[in-house]
Image (cartoon, rainbow, N blue to C red):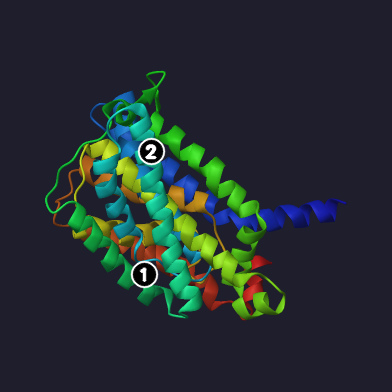
Amino acid sequence: MNDWRMSDWRYWFNDHKGTLLAFAVFIVMFTIYAGNHSAGLTPNVATTAANKGVLLALVAMAQTLVVLTAGIDLSVGMVFVLANCLASHLVVGTPVQTGLGVVAVLAAGLLCGAINGLIVIYGRLQPIVTTLATGAIYFGIALALRPVPGGDVNAELADAVTGRLWETIPAALAALAGIVVLICIPYRRSVLGRAAYAVGSSEPAAYMSGVPIGRAKLLAYSLSGLLASCGGLMLTFLTYSGEASAATGGTYTLNSIAAVVLGGVSLYGGLGSAIGAIFGAFVLRTIGDLLFVFDFDPLWQPLFQGVILLVAVSLASVRLLKIRNRLDLFG
């Protein structure tokens, strides 16, 4: 019995150690940040940091679901921008109109993700090529919706999502926790969620085992689009406007991949979790905050962030160099 418990604990630890490491790094870095901030850890400082972190966390979660299937989604940033532009048109007016607008924005994100999945599955194109092309299309639609920045959003809803609960807890963190509980945890425990891990580990083996590969991939890409649109909604709540910015879309796409790596998700697929990507996103955002607090020259900040990311990717690759059989990843 003790041997079984030790084996079970060892499996759990191997499955979650990337998440645990990202969480530990985030706690250390945020403690340093709060300790050196001129205002200290006030509710305003915590809320500002949470709002910025949640934006990237949502896009990183979207990226994670695709990466787990051994794919990559270069359109998540553009779906994020499209949702922002769409929300600046639709999430306004009466509570009923606002609610319908939110549903429409989320449905649009879900549709974008589903289109990606259908092309990858039935068109048999590489995910990187597919999502690069569809991302350009989504950005074109966003640009048609918002040729110039502008628009509006329901102020009461925006203030509720980006403000604080009981004057202390950032509401954005509560919203993020709700999304994890409603989407990510049920997905991971579902048949198709487990199938996505199997596909990412070895698609030929998954096929031979009768795993529904097509449905697993379609659901992963669809939920990826949904989560990216949640991020676009959050951006609209923060800025009260929409903007079709290619720079914003590209930055969030690249940072989502960085957050996935920092969160312990394997770019080879089949290993990691959306929760790990959340802490990876928080780590990445905190790096930028630390550079600001310690007054690094802005011209050097991208170089410093790039070096940190390179080190993280290299450390993640060291283990893969020692592996002869990919099943060793889960041993």
Mark 2 vs mark 1, CA separation in Å? 28 Å
Residue at 49% from the left image edge and 38% from the top image edge: 177
Q: Position of residue 323 (x, y in %)?
A: 59, 77
Q: Pinpoint residue 69: horizontal percent, then vertical percent.
A: 53, 68
Pointer 2 or 1: first along the chain? 2
Mark drawn on residue 121: none
x%, y% of residue 102?
A: 37, 40
Badge 1 amino acid: Thr
Q: Disc 1 marks which residue?
A: 131
Q: State the quadrant of the C terminus.
A: bottom right
Residue pointed to by mark 2: 100
Graded by Cα atoms within 10 Å as few (under 14), some (14 to 19) or many (20 or more), the crowding at tag 2 reads some
Could you tell whether 267 is left or right of 211 in the image? left
Q: Is residue 173 above or below residue 324?
A: above
- SS at mark 1? helix
Residue lying farthest right?
1
Helix, strand or loop at label 2? It is: helix
**What's the amino acid at mark 2?**
Leu
